[in-house]
């Protein structure tokens, strides 16, 4: 793609990103005191991260079965308050083990 064909896409995406970040600061001048809105804004980053991550989990392995078993292992470990590094490492090891077993069968 030539630079001059790419430039409009770059400018539009930069403008949209700037507007999304600038408009709340311009439109909301006073402190937000509504508990519902504060609660909603508190959980938005977690929900967006979840929506972006969950589909990737199931399409990142060679089999949906190994992805599901790895996701279940991560879910159980996270439920019991294990650390992020431990959850990630063990769930990756579980996926590797399940894919190894599936390869042998």
Image (cartoon, rainbow, N blue to C red):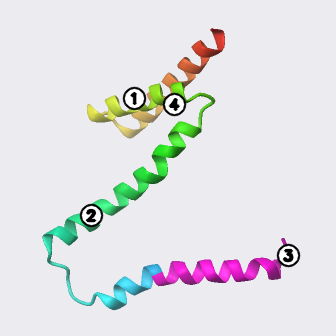
Q: Quadrant of the C terminus?
A: top right
Disc 3 secondary structure class:
loop
**Residue mark closest to the camera, 2 vs 4:** 4
Q: Earlier in the sequence, mark 4 or mark 3?
A: 3
Which of the labelled discs sits on residue 2, or is there none? Answer: 3
- The residue lying at 17 percent from left, 68 percent from top is 36
Q: CA distance from mark 4 to mark 3?
A: 39 Å
Q: Residue furthest front?
A: 64
Crowdedness near tag 1: few (<14), some (14–19) or many (≥20) residues, C-alpha within 10 Å: some
Q: CA distance from mark 2 to mark 4?
A: 29 Å
Q: Residue furthest top?
A: 105
Q: Earlier in the sequence, mark 2 or mark 1?
A: 2
Disc 4 secondary structure class:
helix
Pinpoint residue 43: horizontal percent, then vertical percent.
29, 60
Disc 2 secondary structure class:
helix
Q: CA distance from mark 2 to mark 1?
A: 26 Å
Pinpoint residue 14: horizontal percent, then vertical percent.
59, 80
Q: Earlier in the sequence, mark 2 or mark 4?
A: 2
In this rendering, the answer to whether 33 lies above or below 43 is below
- The residue lying at 48 percent from left, 53 percent from top is 52
- The residue lying at 25 percent from left, 65 percent from top is 40
Q: Which residue is mark 2?
A: 42
Q: CA distance from mark 3 to mark 1?
A: 45 Å
Q: Which residue is mark 1?
A: 72
Q: Are marks 3 and 1 in contact (CB under 8 Å)?
A: no
- The residue lying at 58 percent from left, 39 percent from top is 59
């Amino acid at each position: 793609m030539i630079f001059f064909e790419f430039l409009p896409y770059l400018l539009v995406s930069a403008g949209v990103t700037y507007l999304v970040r600038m408009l709340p600061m311009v439109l909301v001048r006073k402190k937000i005191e509504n508990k519902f809105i504060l609660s909603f804004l508190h959980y938005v980053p977690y929900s967006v991260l979840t929506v972006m991550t969950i589909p990737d989990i199931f399409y990142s392995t060679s089999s949906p079965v190994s992805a599901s078993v790895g996701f279940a292992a991560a879910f159980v470990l996270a439920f019991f308050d294990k650390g992020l590094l431990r959850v990630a490492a063990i769930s990756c090891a579980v996926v590797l083990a399940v894919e190894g077993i599936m390869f042998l069968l």
